[in-house]
Image: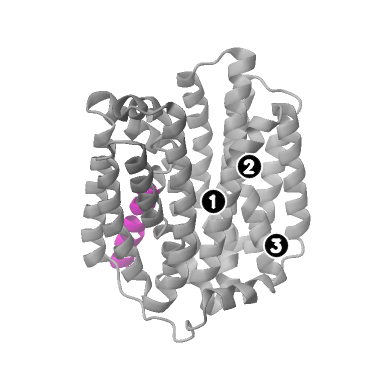
Amino acid sequence: MKRLNLVAFLLIITGVFVASNIYTFIPIYQSISDSIQISVEQAVVGGSIFSFSYACGLLFFGPLSEKIGRKKIILLGLILSFLATGLVGFSYNEKSLYVFRCLQGFALGSFPPVAFAYIFDVFPLRHRTFVLALINCGFLFAGILGQLISSSLTYFYGWQYVFYCFAIIYLFLFISGLFILPSVPVAKQARASFFHEFCIMIKNPSLVICYIITFSILLTFISFYDGIGQYLHDEYSIDQQALFKIRAIGLIGASFSILTGKLVRRFGDRRTLLLGLCLVAISLSFLLFIRTPVMIAVMSIPFIAALSLLYPSLISIIGKLGKHARGSAISLYSFTLMTGGSLGALLASGLPFSLLVVSLIGIFIINIALSVKLKI
């Protein structure tokens, strides 16, 4: 049991530092543009390239892990992340920044789907949901931690040291993984192509429902936080520092993810999923009537708490429905999640805040109706 505790701790820490790099560019666009003499808009494109290549990595490494083993892919991804992340710090012009960020995103995309499938292989049922919940909680905290590390290191040393620091962390995690992570036998059934497995998965109505719900989760998270940023700046002239604190308050809700395991054992995956969907819709509904900064900060707590329930519940359901093609099924989950997230900022920028809230509530009402039809 002590070995499994170490494995869980390593996976959680790795998840936090992998997800942190999704957000490291946000506070340092200006520093990068000044350093390598490109515009801020060109630096932002580097972030978009990272997101696209990260999504491609999510889709590629899960099926590959079915064929050569989960531990090998996790370790391979970490050593590639060490090399690619270090290269980002050596970017000297626009093209090198794009190439190195592309490599980094693809390498980091190896972790989430493979780690989630690995948890199904290594942990007993009674501990599995709890570990999944903690990793997803770490992903949510990474949204704040990544920006905090990035802005702090840039302020004291320069933006390059953000990536040197993360590279060293990935190397340390790789070495730790060599000794801590147990090997898992490769499934004998894992011989079909990903395209064949994909065709099988989309013929399963329950999996399709899960992917529809998955698409909306990160879309909602990003559009909500982008939306409140624009709204509070326009209506209340709130600066970035105060906005950062409001976002951080919402992450208190992520701590509720530790209850997911107990809820799943008591009510089952489907009812826990339904509870999370209803809680998202209810917490957003309050913002139809009161939209003061204090109200937004307070209601973001149950909003994040609900999302913390949804992530592990969906992964658990998809892992069970995916059966022997679990790695591919969870890869498609991760890719769908990131695809939805990439549209979140567009949705927030294109709609007034009140209409955005109404739209998100509508999306989750549809999700609630779909979740009732789930068969596990």
First along the sequence among labels 1 and 3 = 3
What residue do we see at 68% from left, 22% from top?
Answer: 291
SS category of the residue bearing label 2 = helix
| Image quarter of the N terminus | bottom left
Q: Nearer the viewer, residue 350 or 205?
A: 350
Q: Is residue 11 magenta?
A: yes
Label 1 crowd bin: few (<14), some (14–19), many (20+), radius 10 Å: many
SS category of the residue bearing label 3 = helix
Q: Which amino acid does the dot numbered 2 rest on?
A: Thr
Mark in front: 1 vs 3: 1
SS category of the residue bearing label 1 = helix
Q: Is residue 376 above or below residue 96?
A: below
Label 2 crowd bin: few (<14), some (14–19), many (20+), radius 10 Å: many
Residue hosting label 2: 220
Indicate the position of residue 298 as horizontal and vertical percent values: 60, 28
What residue do we see at 48% from left, 20% from top?
Answer: 240
Task: State how far apart marks 1 and 3 are (Cα).
Answer: 17 Å
